Image: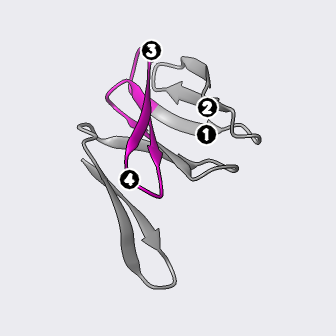
Amino acid sequence: MTSRLWDIEGRRAIRRFTGFGNPIGAVALSPRSPVGIVAGDGLNVCLWNLNTGNSIQTLTGQCAGVAAATFSPDGRRVLSGAYDGCVCLWNVE
């Protein structure tokens, strides 16, 4: 699977994120840094550097596909929720 970061005004993709092998169920942007989350059916939450397109960190431990993910307001934690109702809180400092 490939996800893209879009320039809405210019109507063009400005960055591609590849290597995520499962259907995507959730995306989110950090409020404090150029980091994004991509998560989905693969039981992992992947953090990406939005400036370079490089993978930063993979958070593992969900027991089912990830349905939602978000950053805390300070950008230090990620909260993810899976289709089985399991919620994980990750420290990503």
Mark-to-mark CA distance, 3 and 2? 13 Å
Neighbor class of circle 1 (other Cα within 10 Å; few <14, some 14-19, many 20+) is: many
Q: Is residue 60 magenta?
A: yes
**Local secondary structure at mark 2:** strand
- In the displayed structure, 60 sits above or below 22; it is above
**Local secondary structure at mark 1:** strand
Residue designated by label 4: 53
Residue designated by label 3: 61
**Magenta residues, start to end:** 38-66
Query: For the residue marked with disc 4, what is the amino acid?
Result: Gly
| Residue at 54% in and 20% down | 85
Mark-to-mark CA distance, 3 and 1? 16 Å
Foreground mark, 2 or 4, reads 4
| Residue at 36% in and 71% down | 13
Mark-to-mark CA distance, 1 and 2? 6 Å
Whether the residues at callouts 4 and 1 have beta carbons within 8 Å, the answer is: no
Sequence-wise, which precedes: disc 3 or disc 2?
3
Q: Nearer the viewer, residue 25 or 29?
A: 29
Residue designated by label 1: 70
Query: For the residue marked with disc 3, what is the amino acid?
Result: Gly
Q: Where residue 4 is drawn, which disc sits there?
A: none
